[in-house]
Amino acid sequence: MDSVNIIDKLTKGVIIINVVFNIPFATMIIVAALSGISESIVESARAVGAGRFRVFFQMVLPLSFKDVMIAMVFIFMSNISSFTTPYLIGRNHPLLLGVYLRKTFANREYNLAAAISVVIFLFSSISAFVYLYTNLKEKDWEARAPQ
């Protein structure tokens, strides 16, 4: 086997393990959001002639957008700090950011480790901003709704 074939198999392994770990978690959050959408909303949209795609994109998706974003942020945050996935695939391959940071710090490459830490912090900050923006946007919408 050549090294390209091994790396290709390891990459597929990382994807498969992430799917196995993250799909049930995301599904649980999204199903809870979808169960909160009243059937009368979908039925009333269909009654006025909306098709399946229009009902989904203009009714269901906007009502469940917040929860979909929360699931995406939680999965991103768990993957950016993941040590489980690379160690299940193999100790030396592949190097995700968390594992690479640990290895550079263990090799006493403190400048590179600091740079990687800043990159991880920036990714995490962007993800936290998306999470907060999504939640604050929803609260703003609730405040404007007539009582």
Image (cartoon, rainbow, N blue to C red):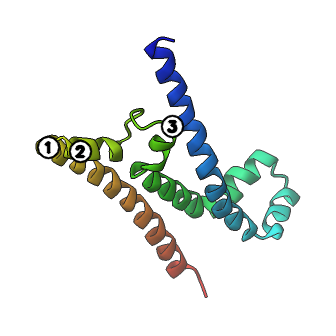
Residue 108 badge: 1
Task: Report the residue marked by disc 2.
Answer: 116
Comes first in the chain, label 2 or label 3 = 3
Residue 50 lies left or right of residue 29; in this view the side is right
Residue 85, x across and y down, in percent = 49, 44
Q: Are marks 1 and 3 in contact (CB under 8 Å)?
A: no
The residue carrying pointer 3 sits among few (fewer than 14), some (14 to 19) or many (20 or more) residues within 10 Å by Cα, namely some
Residue 67, x across and y down, in percent = 58, 63
Residue 129 badge: none
Q: Residue at x 42, y 49 (%)?
A: 83
Outermost residue to the top: 2
Q: Residue at x 59, y 51 (%)?
A: 22
**Amino acid marked by disc 3:** Ile
Residue 89 badge: 3
Nearer to the camera, 51 or 77:
77
For label 2, the SS is: helix
Residue 147, x across and y down, in percent = 61, 88
